[in-house]
């Protein structure tokens, strides 16, 4: 049994024990949420490990890829904050990393001098085209046991869960 599968076995046993003493515990939903978190965390660890030699983390790389795929290869830090689910302070740190690595430049917008834009450099484009194919085998491997129909279903279901979470957080009345 692998590390993740072993952790999942412990998770199942622990939730089963908790359900015996916590009336109404939504066992299936708790298991599903924990599975999402555990698999996501495991994938994130792998991504971080692969990016570390390049002086980057996942948030740095995701931001670089958002700029790479943006119209004209440019985006403002505020646009990136929303898309990357990062705060302004962390986006400043990310931008500093990407500028230091020579993957993006930071300049005032031509259209609005008050607005800062990050633009991908030729070095940033080369890096993206170099690193992405190296990740393909792991991406394919993560979903190797799923059929095309199962992948489509998983995509659909995760998007529905995401919409539910958006709805919950938008209407959250907690202080």
Image (spheres, rainbow, N blue to C red):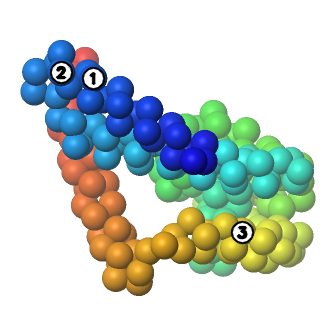
Which residue is identified by label 3? 135
Residue 2 drawn at (x, y percent): 60, 48
Residue 21 drawn at (x, y percent): 18, 16
Residue located at (77% from left, 48% from top): 49
Element marked by disc 1? helix
**Sequence-first tag of 2 and 3:** 2
**Going by the image, does 70 lie left or right of 150?**
right
Q: Nearer the viewer, residue 156 or 86?
A: 156
Residue 68 drawn at (x, y percent): 69, 71
Q: CA distance from mark 2 to mark 3?
A: 42 Å
**Going by the image, does 97 lie left or right of 74?**
right
Say few, some or many: other residues with alpha carbon within 10 Å of mark 3 (under 14 / 14 to 19 / 20 or more): few
Kindly check if marks 1 and 3 are in contact, taking CB atoms under 8 A apart as contact: no
Work out whether residue 175 can be spotted.
yes
Quadrant housing residue 16: top left
Quadrant housing residue 11: top left
Kindly check if marks 2 and 1 are in contact, taking CB atoms under 8 A apart as contact: yes
Q: Nearer the viewer, residue 172 or 41?
A: 41
Which residue is identified by label 1? 17
Say few, some or many: other residues with alpha carbon within 10 Å of mark 1 (under 14 / 14 to 19 / 20 or more): few
Mark on residue 112? none
Q: CA distance from mark 2 to mark 1?
A: 5 Å
Residue located at (34% from left, 68% from top): 154
Which residue is identified by label 2? 20
Q: Nearer the viewer, residue 29 or 166?
A: 29
**92 relative to 126, above or below:** above
Element marked by disc 3? helix
Say few, some or many: other residues with alpha carbon within 10 Å of mark 2 (under 14 / 14 to 19 / 20 or more): few
Residue 153 drawn at (x, y percent): 30, 73
Element marked by disc 2? helix
Q: CA distance from mark 1 to mark 3?
A: 38 Å
């Amino acid at each position: 049994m692998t590390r993740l599968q072993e952790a999942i076995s412990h998770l199942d046993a622990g939730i089963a024990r908790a359900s015996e003493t916590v009336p109404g515990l939504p066992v299936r939903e708790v298991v599903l949420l924990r599975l999402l978190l555990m698999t996501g965390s495991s994938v994130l660890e792998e991504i971080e490990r692969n990016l570390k030699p390049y002086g980057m983390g996942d948030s740095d790389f995701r931001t670089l890829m958002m700029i790479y795929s943006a119209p004209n290869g440019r985006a403002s830090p505020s646009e990136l904050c929303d898309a990357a689910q990062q705060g302004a302070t962390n986006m400043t740190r990310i931008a500093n990393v990407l500028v230091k690595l020579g993957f993006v430049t930071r300049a005032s917008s031509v259209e609005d001098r008050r607005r800062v834009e990050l633009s991908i450099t030729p070095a940033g484009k080369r890096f993206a085209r170099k690193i992405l194919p190296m990740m393909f085998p792991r991406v394919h491997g993560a979903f190797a046991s799923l059929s095309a129909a199962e992948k489509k279903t998983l995509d659909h279901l995760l998007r529905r869960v995401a919409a539910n979470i958006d709805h919950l957080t938008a209407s959250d009345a907690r202080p």
